[in-house]
Structure formats: C-alpha cells, structure tokens
Image (cartoon, rainbow, N blue to C red):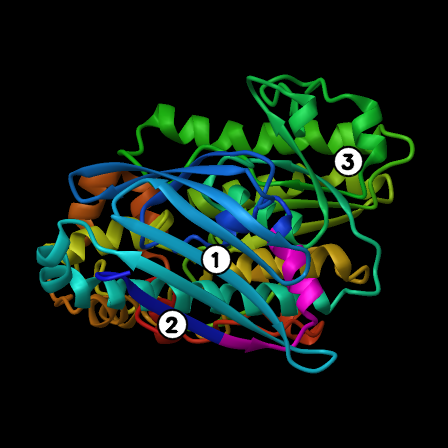
Amino acid sequence: MPGNETFIFRSRIPAAAGEVFAWHERPGAFERLTPPFEHVTLAEMTDGIRDGSRVTLKIRNGPLRLTWVARHSGFVPGRSFVDTQERGPFARWVHTHRFIPDGGSAMVMEDHVEYRPPLGWLGRVAGGGVIRRKLGRMFGYRHRVLAGDIAAHAAWRGRPRLHVILTGASGFLGSALAAFLTTGGHAVSRLVRSNPDPARGRYLWRPDQPDPGIDPALLASADAVVHLSGEPLIGGRWTPAKARRVRESRVATTAALARAVAATTPSPRVFVSASGTGFYGDRGEAELDESADAGSGFLAELCRDWESAAKPAAEQGVRTVQLRIGAVLSPDGGILRGMGGLLRVGLAGPLGHGRQRTGWISLDDTVGAILHVLMRQDLQGPVNLCAPECPSNREFVRAIGRAIHRPAVMPMPAWALRLMFGQPLAEGALASARVIPRELTESGYTFRHPTLDGTLAHVLGIA
C-alpha cells in the first residue's frame, strides 16, 4: 500500500525454534523484551499471544502520554504470531514475529514490521529516519535480551523447573526477576502487602509482624524463597525516621521470613535474601571477596544485621544465601536513573574526591546470577553480585557521561552530599569497596555484561 514502510530485524539464536517460541508464550515475555529506555508500561494483556488476544500499553514520550492497543492474530505454534495496532501513534502497524528453523539446534528470529507514520507525507519526511533509528535500537535490545535469556535458561535445561516464592516483586529488581523466571518456565508466587489474588499468584503476607502470616501450605510447596523487599535506599533525604524504616524493612522482615521458612515442613530447599556491598564499608583499594569482614558505619552494620537475620533458616538446614548486590544499572531505577537525569542537564560529576571504588552489575546479570544461585546447590552464605570490573567513582560517572554524550565534570563535594541526602546515604556513596565476585566466577557463572561501557551501551540502546 502506498505510504507503507517496512522494517526487518533478524538474528540467529542457538536454540530450537519451538523453544524460543515457547519463551514468548510465557508470562513475563513482554516485560523482558521492553527496553528500559522506551518508557513503556504494560497496562493489560489477555490470553498471551494467541489469536484474538489484546495488549494495552501506556507510553510516555517526554510530556506526551499515549495508549497503544494491539490485537494478536496469525498464531502458528512454533512458527509465528502477529500483532496489529488497533489504537496508537501509527497510521498503520503490523508486526509479524517469525521463528525460522536453522538446523536442528538453531533458529533465526525475525521481526517484520509494516508501518505507516502518522501525519501522512509530512510524517514520512519529518520522522522517517527517526522512526527507523528508534526501531533499530528497540529490536537490537530485544534480540540481545532474548538470546541472553534463552542461553541462561538452557544452561539448566536438564534440571526441574522451580516454584519460587518472591518478596519485593513489584520493585525494580523483583519485577525483572519474576519476568525472567516465568519466561524460563519457573513458577513464581508473589508475597504482597495488599490486594492478594491467589488465582494470579499473589499471596498476602504481613512483613511488619513477627509472624508474617504466610500460608504454610504455600511455603511447603516451594522449592525456593527469594527475599528482595525493603524500603528504597535512594529517594529523599535520610532523616532518622528514614534510616529506621530502611533498617526495619530489612532486618525485621528477613528474620520473620527466615523463621517461617525454618518452621515449615517440608522446608523450601533454599532461602535467598538480599544484602548489599555496603557490608564492606570504606576499604580503599583492598580487593574484597566474600571472605572479607564487615566494615564500619551505618550501611555496613545494617548489612551485617540483615544477613544475620537469615540465620533461623540456615540453622534449620535450609541452604541460605545472602546476595551482596552492587549498584544495579538500568534507566528504570537505581543510581543510573537519578545520575543519568542530572548528567543530561550538566549537573552531575564525581562524588567527593571520586577515587572511591564503585561496585555495579547489569540488571540482566543480576537476575541471571540469582538463577545461578538457585540452581547451584553448592553455593551458600554470602555471594557478591557485582561485575568483575570495579572502577573508581570518577571513572564510573565519566562512563555514563560518555554514553549519553554529556560532560561529567561538576563534582559534588562531600559536605553537599551530606546536606542533600543525609549522613548514612552520603557515607555509602563516598565509601570505597573494590568488590570481587569470586563465588560467582569460581562456580562457573558467565557475565553477559562484564564491562561498564558495554553495559551502558546495552541498557541505553546504543550498542
């Protein structure tokens, strides 16, 4: 049809076409494939990708707010499905997903899009190049995530799928982990504080109570419990009340959940609880693997007590793992979301003197490493979740600036950090911890994103 444009993106994946198609059918596929730089939220989805099902998206583009509704058709098991825009920004949009066998153990993933920009010839002239570049960024990201996720789950293809109970599932990290696990065929039951819906895998718990009130039958049916909930560290100034909420939301809830796990018969086989690299405190240039002692200061003491709160599960013989997580990099949340915004307007740079080491990890490697921990039955105790590369804060900030083509030269003095964010958070930002992921690497985990520049290129869509 005159005015239609065609965009095609292909990549080869070393997996059978049916396996990759099945990944797309499972809950969480859309969430995993949505680039964090696109500001798209899934509002509703009915009946997956089968004919007649619909997906409703909420899109934010600067000050604009758009709704996109697409209907699925052309469902051919193991081979293809189509989504067609019924309402949205394009004059026409028909996206065909093709799964093309390429030998017995590989396939070609093809995204074939026929579209017509809005505003007729003006849209084609003014926005044609912009649209194609945007599609290239989006599908490049999608194909990288798809290939990485398929490979991560294929590593455990011979092992039974797990039933995982997850706290913090609505958070930045928890929502990504839930989607990653369900697309891999694992079952996830989410513990929530309100609006439980067992039919949708949402179960009530009371994390602020000594007895969290979790259904014992639910715990007994689980293979694993992953505990990620807690008051966000970033956001607002740290007042004494904020510090108290941060501590109670971690230490008390972990203790209550660990006691519930320990009291269950049969118990889940593994209890995984979040902690942080703040455990090590300010240690200069010393290399810190999991055998290093706790440091000093508010965050170090918090992490020490947080990890100790998991002891009831360990004492009952449940394999217990504490995840010492570095700064998780994604535009969707955490340090990159805040710092990227400041850098774009020229208001960010090194923190303090900038020589302190900053441990970090990509979001994809965070969820992949958690799956690795769940599956590797010999891993227990502390595990550092951070990339092998541990730059100084000055190098870290400059790398973000390079990625978004902005200068990163406006330092924030230590006194200004303390004034703006409070002593505990400033203390953590200025602490130097050269953290080494020894347990992960020696147990065979392969990082998808071992370098900072490569990670930023991926999550910002410039790879």
Q: Nearer the viewer, mark 1 or mark 2?
A: 1
Residue at 38%, 62% in the rendered image:
113
Q: Residue furthest bottom?
A: 103
Query: How many residues crowd around disc 2 within 10 Å: few (fewer than 14), some, or many (20 or more)?
Result: many
Q: Nearer the viewer, mark 1 or mark 3?
A: 1
The residue under label 1 is 363
Q: Is residue 443 visible?
A: yes
Q: Quadrant of the N terminus?
A: bottom left
Vertical placement of residue 345 versus 272, above or below: below
Q: Is residue 40 left or right of residue 394?
A: right
Query: How many residues crowd around disc 3 within 10 Å: few (fewer than 14), some, or many (20 or more)?
Result: many
In the rendered image, residue 171 lying in the magenta stretch gets the answer no
Residue type at mark 1 is: Leu
In the rendered image, residue 16 lying in the magenta stretch gets the answer yes
Q: Quadrant of residue 189?
A: top right
Residue 373 x %, y %? 70, 58
The residue under label 2 is 452
Between 20 and 331, the one lying in front of the other is: 20
Residue at 35%, 26% in the rendered image:
240
Q: Is residue 293 visible?
A: no
Element carrying mark 2 = helix
Looking at the rendering, the stretch of residues picked out in magenta corresponds to 11-24
Answer whether labels 2 and 3 touch (C-beta < 8 Å). Answer: no
Q: CA distance from mark 1 to mark 3?
A: 29 Å
Q: Quadrant of residue 42?
A: top left
Q: CA distance from mark 1 to mark 2?
A: 12 Å
Q: Which disc, if any, is residue 312?
A: 3
Residue 331 x %, y %? 33, 53
Q: CA distance from mark 2 to mark 3?
A: 37 Å
